[in-house]
Image: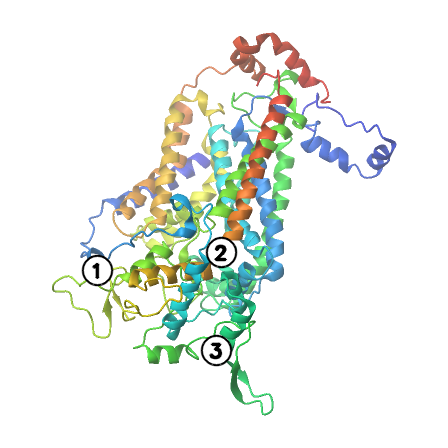
Amino acid sequence: MVRFLGFGAGLVFVIALLVAALLPREDVPADPIKAIHEHARSAHWQHDGPLGMGVFGTYDRAQLQRGFQVYKEVCSACHGLRLVAFRNLSEIGFSAAEVKALAKAKEVPSINPQTGEVATRPALPSDHWPNPFPNEVAARAANNNALPPDLSLIIKARPDGQNYVYSLLTGYDKAPPKGFDVPQGLHFNPYFHSVNIAMAKPLNDGQVSYADGTNASVDQMSKDVVAFLRWTSEPELETRRQVGVGAIIFLGILSLLAFLTYRRVWAGIAH
Amino acid sequence: MSFPWANHYEPKHPLMQWVDQRLPLPRLVYNAVGAGYPVPRNINYWYNFGVLAGVALMVQIITGIVLAMHFSAHTSTAFDSVEHIMRNVNSGWLIRYMHMNGASFFFIVVYFHIFRGLYYGSYKSPREVVWMLGVVIFLLMMATAFMGYVLPWGQMSFWGAQVITSLFSAIPLVGEAIRTWLVGGFAPDNATLTRFFSLHYLLPFVILGVVILKIWALHIPGSTNPAGVEVQGPQDTLPFHPYFTAKDFFGICIYLLFFAAFVFFMPNAMGHPDNYIPANPLSTPAHIVPEWYFWPFYAILRAFTINFLWIPAKLWGVIAMFASILLLFFLPWLDSSRVKSTAYRPMYKIWFWVLVIDVLILAYCGGAPAEEPYVRISQIAAAYYFAHFLIILPILSFIEKPLPLPNSIAESVFAKAGHKDGAHAPAAAGAAAAPAE
């Protein structure tokens, strides 16, 4: 009985599927954007270690601080970093006094302790990085109706995040193909999914002056800020890899001992 | 419990005798996973995956309980509380990455376990109930994993919940009402998140309960084995402890090596980047895809593109997706061949491997965008999936001439080992019956 019912049900499913498979398809016009859109260029990342395998690499503190400088002086005008607290900056090599000073330079929303009215106060190390706009409406109003995304997790929130953000930041100099109209208020960038991005070219050569004398080319600044954003996405990366190498060594030895035990227990037993 | 020649629990220490007469828990353990449970001596490494699934379940429960201490089930705080775990909770990143990858690994070992069950005919008499309880666990796992994926309240959480719960709206007449009732509103929102959290905490313990039932049912006939013939006497078996505890421990170590490689070095490889964007009901992602372990079933859902026999395409897809799993309940009766191991079924062997490749193709199409050629490929692959179980298998059982089976497990084992250690064979057979010391 089960077999007869199953046979019937199976036949119906198969016919429904094969009829659908045999029906001719409507012509889908090719998406012109697809032909122009480019995949992210791969860059070398020091923190991904040898061969970019991401097993042994550690962050370059000097690069993270340079990247922080780019974020602070350029990106932070429009993009927030709400998951990062000032105290976290001590992890990329700033001293306690430097963290305090960095925090103090920023104002965060507060209330007047006497009147209870809305006010601001200098940030403390425990405060998070303040958002550049009070709310989404304000952000859109200031940016031609586009919303600048928060950057705390941007590297993890995009496929191939590091290379994507790096390519995007360095991809403004490519000219659009002949006959391609860039809508008004948007900018051509072949690495952006729709190739028309609301963000204007953010970096120009020499835009920031690095204290360590590194040449502030667009390429260098892009790499630095991407490294910094990788850190904001994955602050645990170094600990994770360290613990990981230990765990793999431990489990490797344990596996070997377990295998020898297994061989010993089964010695002379046919199976 | 299972075979008359099983070792008997005889506590020697007076304290253990005292306990045994009052709460025979040590006896239960001895008979279930100790020296009192005889196991076919020839089972291979494919038989490790059942224990590994148990390990994966325990890892999920333990890490999950810790995560729940720090998680905040509210749409306005869920996403940030996950990031709080990642950044501020001591070793929170480890617990969360273990839980996240643990879900994928649970499905990986369960898929291997199902593969083994299909290959060695583990669903056949007298193990039908063991198999059906396994399908129940599989369904519970899928529900648990789906609801767990919603909890971080990222973009894929929200839109995945939106797509999957809207499946219920395909039910004629009452569909929309059922969906509203399940979701607690007209779209996923706080009511959805809190109930999913509650159920996500509950269901793993339900799974644990069904696992206990499954082990109970399994221990009556015992495991199948690669030779495909049932256990006949003491020479066919070895006590679970120490032989299979040793083998399973080795398997667990290898499993943990793979698990650690993902947790520590590529924790996000099996996740979707969009889930690191907070949920936004006003912005639909370009491609909504579920987690990889749902891809074959997602492909079947999307394969139905035409209204057929007055039933709309969407309802066909929903029926077919549920049918593709529910038909597994009937597998013991669909495949009426008495021969268990595929090694002795020359025709079934070919179809079996076609099915394996077919499911991999479905998985690939399920993860790809819903456009040509993926839709057409998934239609043909889905047609084979149903044809395999509902049409080919029942016919095959009648027309296939199986290869001659070995007379017994012991015979097949000693024939294989004959040239190597034939001299030891009688001694080894004796060791099986002797208590393990």
Kind of residue at badge 3: Lys
Q: How crowded is mark 2: few (under 14 residues within 10 Å), some or many (20 or more)?
A: many
Q: Which mark is residue A106?
A: 3
Tell me the residue at 48%/24% (across/down): B341
- State how far apart marks 3 and 1 are (Cα): 41 Å
Kind of residue at badge 2: Tyr
Kind of residue at badge 1: Ile
Return the chain for callout 3.
A
Q: Residue B204 carries which label?
A: none
Residue at the outermost bottom position: A115
Return the x and y of residue B318 as percentages of the image width and height. 40, 52
Tell me the residue at 53%/48% (across/down): A242
Return the chain for callout 2.
B
Can you identify the residue that label 2 sits on?
Answer: B149
Q: On the rendered image, what quadrant is the C terminus of chain B found in?
A: top right
Q: In this orientation, which residue lies closer to the viewer: B54 or A141?
A: A141
Foreground tag (3 vs 1): 3
Q: Please name the colour scheme applied to the rendered image.
A: rainbow
Q: Is residue A148 left or right of residue A117?
A: left
Please report contact status of discs 3 and 1: CB closer than 8 Å, yes or no. no
Tell me the residue at 31%/76% (across/down): A145
- B208 is higher (above) or lower (below) than A264: below
